Image (cartoon, helix red, strand yellow):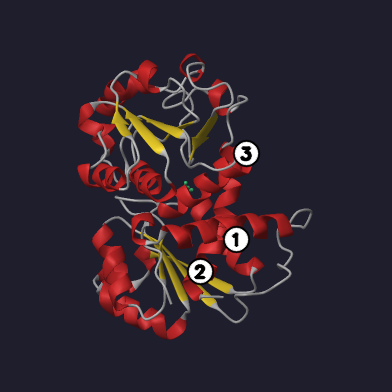
Amino acid sequence: MQNFLDIHQTSAVDLRKMINSAHTMKQARKGLLKGTPDPDQPLAGAMVALIFEKPSTRTRVSFDVGVRQMGGQTMVLSGKEMQLGHGETIADTARVLSRYVDLIMIRTFEEATLLEMADYATVPVINGLTNRTHPCQIMADVMTYEEHRGPITGKKVVWAGDGNNVSASFLHAAGQFGFDFTFTGPQPLDPEPAFIAFARAKGVKINVERNPEVAFEGADLVVTDTWVSMHDAESAKERRHNQLRGYQVTETLMARAKPDALFMHCLPAHRNDEVTSAVMDGAHSVVFDEAENRLHAQKAIMRWCLGV
Ligand code: CP
């Protein structure tokens, strides 16, 4: 039994095995309808709880479909409708759920909630996003880069905009998969120093470059995300837009990246805020492959967690 809480807490060897397994499982499903069971059924008999304290489209559907393809069953739970949202402790919820289900995926606000769930659950817990990190997303992103361009090791990834939870997991992945990472955005929205320190300690190049034109030079992969995250106050919107306007990913900026550079966005996108529609729908963009690969990457993560 293993938790998948963050990319920096999982060995590089195991992360690589999961990516390889995700590619294999994706290949094995070519041409099948989405509801067709996988040839092997590693989750046969397993019950998986998917808990959401925040909205979701991709995480919710991809985990649900992934479990079913592997022969398991799911229950999708909203934090508000559980006693969790009415005063029951995380610890008690974790202990109770562990008597009913074999695996818990939780999307929540505070990282402390995830960690307490993992401490008290006696079944594996998967981080489906917290305010600090989004590791499942970045596993899908690494898989997507490699499916199009081969090994990500040694490549230059540029993150434009807000140094949010998704960028944090990219920094963890930079350290674990061995790629260089340039953050370009305004200083108040820099990623937390701890995330940068982790990647630097692994020996990869991490740059912070305020000028996006300089940052984009020679990029192999350009990534951005919404300027206002789910946990940010609505009142921050106008200030964020003023701070980030210069970091919108445009065709002009993409022209500074390598000709075969890829563009990714974890979605949902706010077209013509953080990225123009021309880039989203342009030749560099692999955003819908990226969304699909949530399914395959998470299936590999669940198998790793359960050792099946
Ligand atoms: N990228 C992502 O996590 O999407 P959802 O919020 O729709 O799950």
Say which residue label 1 marks. Answer: 21
Q: Are marks 1 and 2 in contact (CB under 8 Å)?
A: yes
Image location of residue 159, percent across then percent down: 39, 32
For residue 251, above or below residue 97: above
Q: Amino acid at mark 1?
A: Ser
Q: Is residue 63 visible?
A: no
Q: Earlier in the sequence, mark 1 or mark 2?
A: 1
Residue at 48% x, 40% y is 268
Q: Are marks 3 and 1 in contact (CB under 8 Å)?
A: no
Local crowd at mark 1 within 10 Å, few (<14), some, or many (≥20)?
some
Say which residue label 3 marks. Answer: 148
- Label 3 vs label 1: CA separation? 16 Å
- Label 3 vs label 2: CA separation? 24 Å
Q: Is residue 202 visible?
A: yes
Q: Earlier in the sequence, mark 3 or mark 1?
A: 1
Q: Amino acid at mark 3?
A: His
SS type, badge 2: helix
Q: Indicate the quadrant where residue 71 lies.
A: bottom right
Horizontally, residue 161 falls left or right of residue 153, namely left
Residue at 52% x, 51% y is 58
Taking depth in this image into account, of 13 and 187 the one nearest to the observer is 13
Local crowd at mark 2 within 10 Å, few (<14), some, or many (≥20)?
many
SS type, badge 1: helix
Say which residue label 2 marks. Answer: 304
For residue 165, above or below residue 234: below
Taking depth in this image into account, of 199 and 264 the one nearest to the observer is 199
